[in-house]
Image: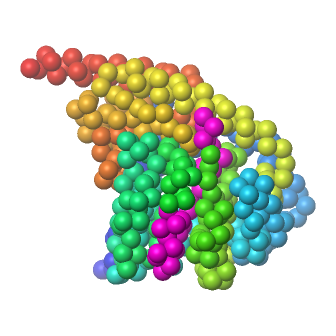
Amino acid sequence: MLTTISGFDRIGEENAFAVLARATELGARGRDIINLGIGQPDFATPPHIVEAAVKALRDGHHGYTPATGIAPLREAVAADLLKRAGAEVSPENVIIVPGGKVTMFAAIAMFGEPGAEILYPDPGFPIYRSMIEFTGATPVPVPIREENAFAFSADELLGLITAKTRLVIVNSPANPCGGVTPRSEMDTLVAGLQRHPHVAILSDEIYGQMTYDGEEHVSLLTFPEIRDRLILLDGWSKTYAMTGWRLGYSVWPDALYDKVRKLAVNAWSCVNAPAQYAGLAALTGPQDAVGEMVAEFDARRKLVVDGLNAIPDVSCIMPKGAFYAFPNIAATGWKAKALASALLEEVGVALIGGPDFGTLGEGYVRVSYANSRENIARALERMEDFLAMETRARRVER
């Protein structure tokens, strides 16, 4: 009988992909499925980016690249961070990776081990906790609360740090709740971290260009006090509608950079060359498509929130970033995952139950508005009809 190390028994998963698979299966059977589950822009990758990849192939870029990524792309990342965030970054601290999850894996693997503690947001991206548990470290949830507009509380986070804490994970703008942590909280966090020099920080800023209502995205790269222990996670998937290209980047402090370079050599060798040239075109080419996409998400955001708040027993605060709403469904009497399953199976609306993002997700569901306005309106109508029907049925039973 084959046995594996215990860490593999602790690996979780991202249930959004399970919901996607089920929605795809039902669609293949002829069901009309509206997918508000997966976190993926429904826009095509801009044509000039696609053409850059095609040209790279035609120009013969078929071989290995440096494990850290091609130099022009790392230089373009550094230039973009300076332009967008006002953060000076050396290309020698940038590494190109095959998707954002790779940066999570590398950072958590570096600091996670039995006896260590790693702080992560709850509700939060499920891979954080999954990878922490894989390493044998203790996952310590940082509550993300509706009453705080789904931003983290710096004081609450700092109060959870102990002598065993090795890494703190923060995410703003946030998945799954759409919260944007304001500068005041970032200032408090950085000031408080001065008392804990043994703690590294992973800042997941993959949605950094998706904020609304004039909300400011504050990058932790702009705080020199923590740059010697800060890891930045970012990439192209959301901003440029490039989820399937599997292309991301991270910025590492000097003390950690060679460690992650060696991990790249051992684990993935390098990112495929044409995708890197596509990423270069994305950063250095026209940005019109980014602004147009975010403007459309903004319109959908308002449609989703207004529609959810019109459904009896459902309430939803206005998200300030990303492309997710996190409505409170506790008053419906449903458990979140059971409601998500029923909506998919019975009326063809795919969304994700809050507990898939952490224990504090009960009472909520995640609604992705990375779908057309027409489909969003149809999905909201189905949700309202389903809940009204269930309410009537319960009354009859009584």
- Residue lying at 50% horizontally and 21% vertically, measured from the top left: 377
Quadrant in the rendering for residue 381: top left
Quadrant in the rendering for residue 150: top left
- Residue lying at 57% horizontally and 52% vertically, measured from the top left: 183
Image quadrant occupied by the C terminus: top left
Q: Which residues are magenta?
A: 189-215
The extreme right residue here reads 59
Image quadrant occupied by the N terminus: bottom left
Q: Is residue 281 above or below residue 92?
A: above
Q: Is residue 11 magenta?
A: no
Report the front residue among 332 and 3.
332
Task: Decide if residue 281 is on the left or right side of residue 40.
Answer: right
Q: Is residue 293 above or below residue 148?
A: above
Task: Decide if residue 303 is on the left or right side of residue 358.
Answer: right
Q: Position of residue 238 (x, y in %)?
A: 63, 48
Q: Name the dominant secondary structure of the magenta segment.
A: loop
Q: Position of residue 226 (x, y in %)?
A: 59, 71
- Residue lying at 39% horizontally and 35% vertically, measured from the top left: 327
Q: Is residue 264 above or below residue 280?
A: below
